Image (tube, grey):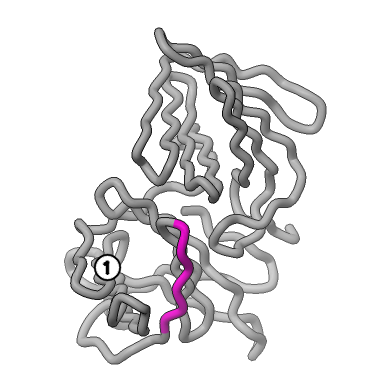
Amino acid sequence: MRLQGPAAVLLVTFLSSCGSPDGGGSFEQSGSAGGPAEPIAATFACGPTRVDATFVEESLRLATEGRSYGLQRAISASGARYTGETESGPIEFWNKGREATLTIGDRTYPTCREVRDHASEDSKVYVARGNEPGWLLHADGAQLVLEIDYGATKIEAPTPEKTQAANGFTYTATNNQHQVVVEVRHNPCVAPSGVPLRDTVTVRVGDRTLRGCGGGPLSDG
C-alpha cells in the first residue's frame, strides 16, 4: 500500500519505539504540525472475503459483504485492536502489521492479509471494486481476475489487452466462457469504504454491467 499526501506523513510504525523483531506493526497516523491525521485506507483478504478498512484517528470503518461497520480503538497488548457492536454481536478487528483477525458475532474469519489497493511500479496490478453486487477486480499483463457477488462467481482470463482511451484506458480479456471489458476513466470516485479513489470503473461481462472505483487514493500532490 503506497501512503500518500503532502499534508501529512502516514506511517506504518513498529509496535514499540525500537520496533518488533518480526517486523509486526499496525497502521498508525500522524498529522502535520498539530493538524488532524489523514485517513489510511487498506484492503484485506480474509480468506475469500474482501474487507475495506479506513483508519481515522482512533476509529476504524470496515466495509465487507455489503455492510459497513464503525469500530473504536481498544486496549491491546500488541498491534491495533478495534471493537464495536453489530446486530450479530460484538465485532473485533485486531491489526498486526500486514495481517489482522476479524470476528463478527460468533463468526471468526480466516486470517486477514493486506492486499495492494492500486497499481504501483513494483506490482503492475490494477485493482478496482464496487458494491451491489459486491465485486473485485485484479488485472495485470498476465491475468485478469474478476470476483462477482461477493466472491460467489470468479472469472479468470489470461493476458488482458490494455488499450489507451480518452482520459483513461480499457482492459479486454477473454476465456472460453466470458469476455470481460473494463473501462477505466480518470475521474474521482468514492469507494465502498468511503475513501475517494482516482478512477471511475465500469465492468461489462455478458449481460451484466458493474460500476465501481479503482486506482489509488486521491492525493493533493
Check the picture and name the quadrant holding the C terminus: bottom right
Q: Is residue 71 left or right of residue 6?
A: left
In this orientation, which residue lies closer to the viewer: 30 or 216?
216
Q: Could you tell me which residue is drawn at 29 percent across and 46 percent down? A: 48
Q: Is residue 150 above or below residue 84?
A: above
Q: Position of residue 20 (x, y in %)?
A: 22, 72
For this orientation, the residue located farthest to the right is: 166
Q: Is residue 111 above or below residue 150?
A: below
Residue 17 highlighted magenta (yes or no): no
Amino acid at dot 1: Leu
Residue displayed at 24% across by 87% down = 76
Classed neighbour count for the residue bearing mark 1: other residues with Cα under 10 Å, few (<14), some (14–19), many (≥20) = some
Q: Position of residue 127 (x, y in %)?
A: 51, 40
Residue in the image at 48% along x and 42% along y? 135
Q: Position of residue 160 (x, y in %)?
A: 51, 17
Q: Which residues are magenta?
A: 66-71
Q: Is residue 92 above or below residue 145?
A: below
x and y, in percent, of residue 192 in the image:
56, 57
Q: Is residue 67 magenta?
A: yes
The extreme top residue here reads 176
Answer with the quarter of the image where residue 153 lies: top left
Can you say whether 203 is above or below 165 in the image?
below
- Residue 83 lies left or right of residue 138; in this view the side is left
Most common secondary structure along the magenta stretch: strand
- For the residue pair 17 and 97, the one nearer the viewer reads as 97
Where is mark 1, residue-wise?
102
Q: Quadrant of residue 35?
A: bottom right
Give the residue displayed 30% in from the left and 71% down from the top.
95
Which image quadrant is residue 149 in? top left
62 sits to left or right of 20: right
